[in-house]
Amino acid sequence: MKISALTIFPEYFSPLELSLIGKASKSGLVNFEILDLREFASGVHRSVDDTPYGGGAGMVMRPDVWGEAIDNFATNESATVIDLVILTPSGRRFTQRDAQELSESEAILFACGRYEGIDARVEAHYRKDERFRVHALSLGDFVLNGGEVAALAMIEAITRLIPGVIGNPSSLLEESHVSEGFLEYPVYTKPPIWRDLEVPDVLLSGNHAAIAKWRGEKSAQDR
């Protein structure tokens, strides 16, 4: 799988070199590519934004710059279909199901907006392009300074589902949000008593049926 990001702050993505994601990259399970949006802007200052039509505070990212960058990416990409993820607070909330679906993609391009966002015509244009599947996604009901942090969170959620990235694949089966309406049950380890708090007796019983029942009940509870 190839995962790319278009951003005016490429250095934001240095964490992709760390931990399991970094190992997955080095082993060839996933190929990361970080592209500098300013390289596709013209003029001495490489400006990527301008004032909004209709007035208002802030600046809007220009569609011509984004179009040039995305078209260039597509020209050099061998995948039949590209999943274009536009990060925006007004997008649909990203879920575990999205992570699962995107983990099966050939190529993902994250469009990391800044300022007041990306000109709406960029999303409209690429929704009409058969080579793209466009996803306008949000990390949650809050606003960030830009899409880079959201992209990093989504990339981690996606890449850990790629076969071979997590050492023990069975650990993915009992996680929160794998089944709709269920969260992962509480987990405990040694010591059995810590600051007067004890591990539930059932987990020390050796009765696997009782343990499975307890975990199922805890997973179904609202917390």
Image (spheres, grey):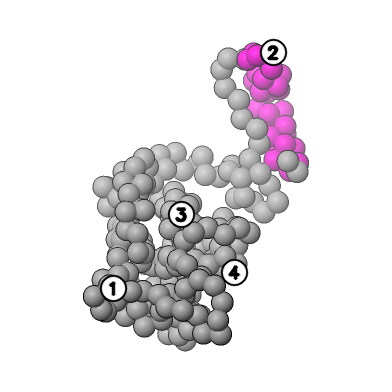
Quarter location, residue 155:
bottom left
Q: Which mark is residue 46?
A: 1
Disc 3 target residue: 149
> Is 213 placed above or below 137 here?
above
- Amino acid at dot 2: Asp
Classed neighbour count for the residue bearing mark 3: other residues with Cα under 10 Å, few (<14), some (14–19), many (≥20): some
Disc 2 target residue: 196
Residue 195 percent coordinates (x, y): 65, 14
Q: Is residue 50 visible?
A: yes
* Number of the front mark, 1 or 3: 1
Q: Is residue 100 visible?
A: no
Residue at left offset 72%, top offset 28%: 210
Quarter location, residue 140:
bottom right
First in sequence: mark 2 vs mark 3: 3
Q: CA distance from mark 4 to mark 2?
A: 46 Å
- Amino acid at dot 1: Arg
Q: CA distance from mark 1 to mark 3?
A: 23 Å
First in sequence: mark 4 vs mark 3: 4
- State yes or no: discs 4 and 2 in contact (Cβ < 8 Å): no
Badge 2 element: loop
